[in-house]
Image (cartoon, rainbow, N blue to C red):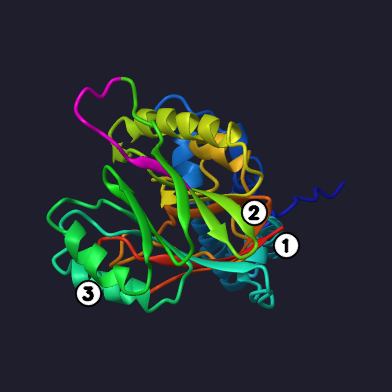
Amino acid sequence: MDLVTSRPVRGRVPAALAVLTAGLLAFHRAVPNTPGRVGSLLESFLPWLGLVVVPLFLHGLLRRAPAALVAVLLPVAVWTRLFGGLLLPADAAGPRDLVVVQHNVADDNPDPAGTARALADAGADLIALEELVPDALPAYERVLGARYPHHVVRGTVGLWSRHPLSGARAVDIKPADLTEPWSRGLRAVAGTPHGEVAVYVAHLPSVRIGPGGLASARRDESAALLGRAVAAEPLDRVILLGDLNGTADDRGLAPLTSRLEVPRRGFAFSFPAGLPLVRIDQVMARSAAVGLLRALPATGSDHLPVTARITLR
């Protein structure tokens, strides 16, 4: 009797890695957030997980491993389902559109006047700024005031507008364990040609990546406070602009992303400015659609400005 031995299937390990990558993309919410907020850390860089496909595909091609080549199609399909829409071109501009700019100008910006000029040249209706410090504020007021006659500043955040602003007030998003003065949220009503819009500007606490994982407890607490403020907003139309120190996929921002629409076009990675890897500068809206989001050229900040067109409903 002849003995028949089966040859091992080539590419089993790359195929398994491809399936694992697809699983992490599709079910990232199932990754636990403890210890170290691993789930949020994964979600912060979720689009980049697709790069795993490249070495897996090359391995399968060079080793002539059909199993690996077929398996690679799975993460490609999931990535396309999650992020493919962001690569599509912008929708046509409409009559009910507002152009907005969001920028963390950095408290150590060496050229606030130059930064202000660059932002003004973007031709936005609304400009939101964070990390406004007393020494630099007059430069922003002087330069932006020529084109934006209406502005409000609360603490270290500010809003400049072509349209009248009313009802300006600070929004309390301060984490409970902070005792020093800390004001990073505001709300104002912009009287646009298409009706009133509540505009929120916010700068959530920073997160840090260390040996214990992602330290984001303060950011998450602040996001929850901001989410409650947005939920209680009496106006239907809401625009949120801010450095939220988190990506739209990060579950830590769920109090906001569950209530507001996120951009439908454009990755617009904004941080760090020298090698942008994540978009933590966000534009979100309610009763409005956020169209193409794109990053603008670098200023004197460690963030890139981002701009978007918002269609009011």
**Mark 1 — residue?**
70
Residue extent of the magenta highlight: 177-188
What residue lies at 44% left-to-right and 76% top-to-bottom?
A: 123
User: Which dot, 1 or 3, sits closer to the camera?
Assistant: 3
What residue lies at 46% left-to-right and 71% top-to-bottom?
A: 124
Specify whether 92 is left or right of 207: right
Mark 2 vs mark 1: which is more N-terminal?
A: 2
Residue situated in front as seen by the camera: 156 or 190: 190
Q: Amino acid at mark 2?
A: Ala
Cα distance between the residues tagged 1 and 3:
52 Å
| Residue 65, percent from left and from top | 66, 65
Dots 2 and 1: beta carbons under 8 Å? yes
**Mark 2 — residue?**
15
Specify whether 252 is left or right of 103: right
Q: Amino acid at mark 1?
A: Val
Dots 1 and 3: beta carbons under 8 Å? no
Residue situated in front as seen by the camera: 165 or 207: 165
